[in-house]
Each structure stands twice: as C-alpha cells, then as structure tokens.
C-alpha cells in the first residue's frame, strides 16, 4: 500500500508549496517509494490530529504515522535500509542536521519576507484570514510591512546563500557527487519560492541556480513538473 | 618523524590564534598524530614558500607538504585511514564542506569585527603594519571603524550562531554523539576569539558555550591549555 503524504495545497489544489513537504517528497523520490499525496490546507488541522501534529508534512505508512520533515526522513532511512541512503551514515545524518537548522533559521527566514505576499495570494480563500493573523502576530507587523523592502530582501537572500555557493564551487551537491537529504532540505526552500513567487530570485549563472536546475531534473524531472513559476 | 605544523603566533610566541591552524591542530589530535608546531608570523612568508602558499596552516609530513586547512584534513583522512575518521565517510566529508563554507563566510566574518583590534594588539611588532594595511584595504575602512559597533557585532555573532544552537538542541556535537571535523571547524573560530579577545562573547548557558566547553576538554584538555582569555 502506497505511503500517504498530507501535502500543503493552495487555492489551486495542484499548487504544493510547503518547503517542508518538498523535503519529504524529494526524500520519498530518492528512496524510490510509491506514495500518494492528500492535499491539505491550514483549515484542515483536525484531519492530521491523529498524527499528533498541527502541521504538515505528515505521512502514513501502513499503521505508522509520522509528522515533521526531519522525523520523516529519519523514519524512512531507518525503515527502508535496502534503498538508497538519504544521509550516507550516522555522521552524514548528524551533519545534515546542521544544514536543516541553517535552512530553517537563516534561509527560510530570508525567503519568508520575499514570499509571504505570494503565499497569501495563492492560498485557498478559507486559509487567508488564518494565515494573515497568525503571521502578523509572529512577525509583529503587517505582512505588507514585513515584505516591503524587496530589493533589500533579494540581496539578503543571495547573501544568505553564500555558504552553499562556496560549497558548490568544489562539489556538485551538498551530499557530494550525488544529491542527499541535505540537498533536498535546501532545495525544498527554493521549491517554496518557485511555487508561489513569480519573481526569479537567483541569477541564471549563480552556482546555486545551476545546482537548483540539476535538482529540478532529478527523478525524471519530478520537481520541474510541479506547479510553479520558474 | 613527527609532522611539522607552521602555526600563526603572536608577539607572545605561545599565543597561537589562527582559526584555520586550530582546525588542523584539533584534526591532528583527533587522529592521535604526533606533531610539533613551528611558530610562524605574517612576515615569514618565504619560510612556507616551499609549500606553494603564503598562508598557514602548512604541514610537512615526511616528504609531503600540504597547505590549507581543508586540504590538510583531507590529506590526513586519506593517509591515516586506520585512525579515527575525521568525516565519517565521503558523505560526511561532503556535508562538512558546507559547515566549512558557513564558518568561513558567516561565522568568521562576524567574529572578524570583534577580534580585529585584539589581533592587532597581540601581533608581533613586525606584523602590525602589514596587518593593518592589508585588512584596511580588504575592509575598505580603518580597523577602528570596522570594529566600532561592539554591541551590534556581539548581537550579530550570537545571531549567526543560531543554526549551531538549533543543531545542538538535539545532538551533543555537529558530528553526532562524538566530535568530528565539522566541530573542529567551528571550534577553531572560537579558539581564535579565545586567543586574542578579552571579552567573553557567549553567555554561560548558551548551548554553543556548553558545546565549546566540551571541546576545550577533549584530548585531555588540549585546547584549554592554550594561551587565551576565556
């Protein structure tokens, strides 16, 4: 029986923009596991309550429910050991945790300012009031104020990506010669940007953009086929 | 024959403050390799010209000279395979490269503003004019202007360490249960701060400070015995 993945969807139910769900979708593809997605919206909190979570991704694999992208990656790695490794060993997993933390607190924070109005625009109508109220409380200002300095925010994003850029100067993927879960972590953030942001945020010849193109092509162009702008 | 390490020294020849040399010293300790240091100053560029480098660390291991902390770590890992691994495999090494890039472009940049006047103060007299001129050219301002906003720079440093802090919430070291080379990369930066900065930059209960304490204790308190302030 295929794994089920609760996957954040926009007003267009095919628009799947959660960076955390993208981590999981790339991990499932890397493992070559069959899965089906269940589109989920912020208003559907009771539909994932069985997993003890208010947020997606949530997967259901037979009798097992797992919430949180990191825990899902660990679960898949531990359960499907005969399939390609996501981490390349316990030390690879430990170092991936640093990449995960960096993506959460640095990269996603930088992207958030650039994407928040696009998210609002693409959300299902039932989710918009919730999204505005919860985010304005978190940011301590209106979404419009939070997003105001577009040029400055693009420059900050490009600056924040410098550690990745330097890494890619000597190896094609964060995982080395082939992509591993740390690549999917960071790529998930850029799928978020691609799914709901109309503005191309990276220059064509940026090594990060070249790397993003390689990951869009992985698994038969799986991510490239997703609803998005660039 | 013990490995030789050219190690940046201050006016007090026992003060060894280069973050990159600290990466190498911790890597040598991790491998349990005997080595001796040769104190080196910026004025001594001709003494390491044989290694094709103008910067330390440089090691000499028998007939082999290697410059650059990352290349040295790769050399030690490849040569001394029977000793404890620095990376935990090729994927661990690949992910370590990201940590290395982050430390170089984010962490060391944040520390640089806090340490530059301390470096100047602790340098050998023969190095001070070179240091001021080369760094003022690089920064495009006087060292005093570069270092002026101490409170803001401390706040920026603590903020920059957030990905490490989040990582350490779930594991004791970046390497996992035990320290690996990614830990030494970041720790090297904090040894730079300890060697020439009189101001304690981290709060006592900061998880990063707790982790730093564990690494000061590694290898029989090897790093704690070094000349430094905190």
Image (cartoon, coloured by chain):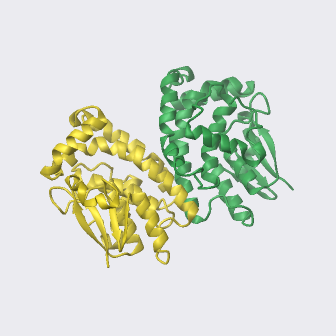
Chain colours: A yellow, B green
A135 displayed left or right of B157: left
Residue B79 percent coordinates (x, y): 73, 64
Q: Where's residue B207, x and y in %?
A: 56, 40
Q: Where is residue B205 in the image (x, y as percent from the top left)?
A: 57, 35
Judged left or right of residue B90, residue A38 is left
Q: Residue at x 40, y 48 (%)?
A: A104
Let me know if residue B127 appears in the view. yes
Is residue B54 visible to the viewer in this orientation of the structure?
no
> In the figure, is residue B101 to the left or right of B53?
left
Quick check: B172 above or below A154? below
Instruction: Tell which of B147 and B48 is nearer to you.
Output: B147
> Residue B204 appears in which quarter of the rendering?
top right
- Where the N terminus of chain B falls, by quadrant? bottom right
Residue in the picture at 46% in, 74% down:
A80
On screen, A195 above or below B133? below
Q: Nearer the viewer, residue A63 or B137?
A: A63
């Amino acid at each position: 029986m295929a794994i089920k993945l609760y996957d954040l969807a926009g007003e267009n139910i095919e628009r799947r923009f959660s960076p955390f769900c993208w981590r999981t979708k790339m991990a499932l593809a890397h493992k070559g596991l069959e899965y089906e997605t269940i589109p989920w919206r912020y208003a559907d909190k009771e539909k994932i309550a069985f997993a003890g979570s208010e947020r997606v991704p949530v997967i259901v694999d037979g009798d097992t429910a797992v919430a949180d992208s990191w825990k899902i990656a660990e679960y898949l790695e531990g359960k499907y050991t005969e399939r390609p490794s996501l981490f390349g060993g316990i030390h690879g997993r430990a170092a991936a945790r640093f990449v995960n933390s960096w993506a959460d607190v640095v990269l996603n924070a930088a992207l958030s300012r650039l994407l928040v109005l696009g998210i609002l625009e693409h959300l299902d109508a039932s989710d918009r009031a919730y999204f505005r109220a919860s985010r304005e409380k978190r940011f301590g200002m209106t979404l419009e104020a939070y997003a105001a300095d577009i040029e400055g925010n693009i420059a900050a994003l490009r600056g924040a990506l410098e550690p990745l850029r330097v890494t890619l100067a000597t190896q094609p993927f964060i995982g080395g010669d082939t992509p591993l879960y740390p690549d999917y972590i960071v790529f998930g953030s850029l799928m978020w940007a691609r799914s709901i942001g109309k503005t191309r945020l990276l220059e064509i010849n940026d090594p990060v953009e070249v790397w993003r193109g390689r990951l869009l092509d992985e698994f038969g162009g799986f991510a490239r086929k997703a609803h998005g702008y660039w």
